[in-house]
Amino acid sequence: MIIITLGPERTLEAGEDDLGRDRVGYSPTMSPGALYDANHGTWHLGERASRESYALVTFDRTVVQAIGINHIEPVAGTYAGRETSRRSVIHGDILTDGHPVHDRYVGQPSPIPPQRNPVGYFDAPEDHTQCLCGCGEPTPAGKDFIPGHDQTALHDRVRQVGTVKEFIEWFDNLRKPF
């Protein structure tokens, strides 16, 4: 889960922001949509961000919004003399009452301790799925398999066909029409 820590609301000058926003940060008077619009980008996100399903927005150590991530888009350009090519925008849906992630986190203390970087990550139970090898164990966030279990699953299937050679022949015969 991506954790975004905001400061107080502040206005931006025209042309200061690649997304054309006129403000960033948090104010208790912002609607959920205004809070999302002001703060869903531009963030320096690590590679892990592409594997995350949710983002939490925090202010003053409290979660103020939960977002279901649809996709993350890189932002190109510069503003205020700073390259943004390594920055990204989080596109998603604002989660509301009744969604398990919203209900568990919004209004609660941030799941990570305060840090200097405004972007952090939390290994949340909601980000885990069952390993696709069939072992039933939870995977690391955004992964289909526990490390090494992909090979176990693959070789289990090869054995169902026979040898590796027989598996390759079987597979190639299936693919011929394509």
Image (spheres, rainbow, N blue to C red):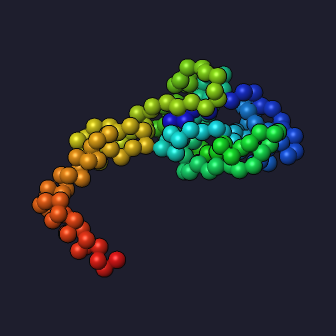
Q: Please provide percent x and percent y for residue 156.
A: 18, 52
- Which one is in front, 139 or 92? 139
Q: Please provide percent x and percent y for residue 112.
A: 53, 23
Q: Is residue 97 visible?
A: no
Residue at point 64%, 38% (across, down)? 44
- Which one is in front, 91 or 116? 116
- Which one is in front, 144 or 97? 144
Q: Quadrant of residue 88?
A: top right
Q: Is residue 52 visible?
A: yes
Residue at point 55%, 51% (across, down)? 70
Q: Quadrant of residue 56?
A: top right
Residue at point 81%, 32% (across, down)? 10
Toward the bottom, the furthest residue is: 177
Q: Quadrant of residue 78?
A: top right
Rendered view: 7 above or below 11: above
Say whether residue 167 is left or right of residue 57.
Answer: left
Rendered view: 171 above or below 148: below
